[in-house]
Image (spheres, rainbow, N blue to C red):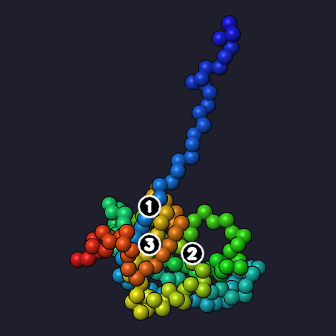
């Protein structure tokens, strides 16, 4: 009778483990870029700042890695933010720098960067020095991925020599 009172092991709820996200390297060969700027009066009801300023840097190119995506065209928007300045970001608890989304025509990315990084990035793009955007993040799931790391580089490292050969015509 004591055996009948014991709960069946299969009746116990099994705890589901949170699936660990697979980390993927995304590499874009820069082919073009564009920068936009706007400055206006802030028309919000209770604005924190009386002005509204927006800077938007878009880097466009061919996705080298990972292979096998629906499209190999990528458009990555780098959005400068005053919240990412060293003094202001100490209290932040971010889950990602930004995200990537797959559409039929392109992989679109929105990534926040510190506002003071915009000037040197623009100088390097104007000089034609930056050739690659390297990002690290989660694998695409439901057509989106989180970006946890961003680099702009003049050349690929030794670890990426195979990618450099793929990029050559």
Q: CA distance from mark 1 to mark 2?
A: 19 Å
Q: Residue at x 38, y 76 (%)?
A: 156
Which residue is disc 1 drawn over? 24
Kindly tell me whether residue 104 is visible in this rendering: no
Q: CA distance from mark 2 to mark 3?
A: 15 Å
Q: State the image quarter where residue 70 is shown.
A: bottom left
Which mark, by number, is residue 112?
Answer: 2
Left or right: residue 85 compared with residue 97: right
Q: Is residue 26 above or below residue 17?
A: below
Q: Quadrant of the C terminus?
A: bottom left
Could you tell me if the residues under marks 1 and 3 are in contact, i.e. CB atoms within 8 Å?
no
Which residue is disc 3 drawn over? 134
Q: Residue at x 40, y 78 (%)?
A: 132
Element type at mark 1: strand
Kindly tell me whether residue 132 is visible in this rendering: yes
Q: Position of residue 57 (x, y in %)?
A: 50, 83
Q: CA distance from mark 1 to mark 3?
A: 11 Å
Element type at mark 3: strand
Q: Residue at x 52, y 63 (%)?
A: 146
Element type at mark 2: strand
Q: Residues within 10 Å of mark 2 (few under 14, many from 20)?
A: some
* Of the pair 99 and 45, the residue shown nearer to us: 99
Which mark, by number, is residue 127?
Answer: none
Q: State the image quarter where residue 93 is shown.
A: bottom right
Q: Residues within 10 Å of mark 1 (few under 14, many from 20)?
A: some
Q: Position of residue 99 (x, y in %)?
A: 51, 66
Comes first in the chain, label 1 or label 3: 1
Q: Position of residue 45 (x, y in %)?
A: 74, 79
Label 1 or label 2, whichever lies nearer to me, is 1
* Of the pair 98 and 137, the residue shown nearer to us: 137
């Amino acid at each position: 009778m004591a055996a009948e009172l014991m709960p069946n092991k299969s009746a116990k709820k099994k705890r589901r483990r949170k699936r660990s996200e697979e980390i993927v390297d995304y590499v874009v060969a820069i082919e073009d870029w564009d920068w936009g700027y706007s400055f206006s009066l802030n028309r919000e009801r209770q604005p924190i700042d009386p002005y509204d300023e927006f800077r938007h840097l878009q880097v466009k190119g061919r996705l080298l890695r990972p292979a096998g995506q629906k499209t190999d065209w990528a458009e990555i928007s780098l959005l400068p933010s005053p919240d990412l300045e060293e003094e202001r970001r100490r209290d932040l608890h971010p889950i990602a720098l930004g995200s990537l989304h797959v559409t039929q025509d392109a992989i679109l990315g929105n990534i926040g960067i510190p506002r003071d990084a915009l000037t040197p990035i623009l100088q390097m793009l104007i000089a034609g020095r930056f050739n690659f955007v390297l990002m690290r993040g989660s694998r695409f799931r439901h057509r989106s991925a989180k970006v946890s790391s961003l680099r702009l580089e003049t050349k690929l490292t030794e670890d990426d020599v195979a990618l450099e050969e793929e990029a050559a015509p």
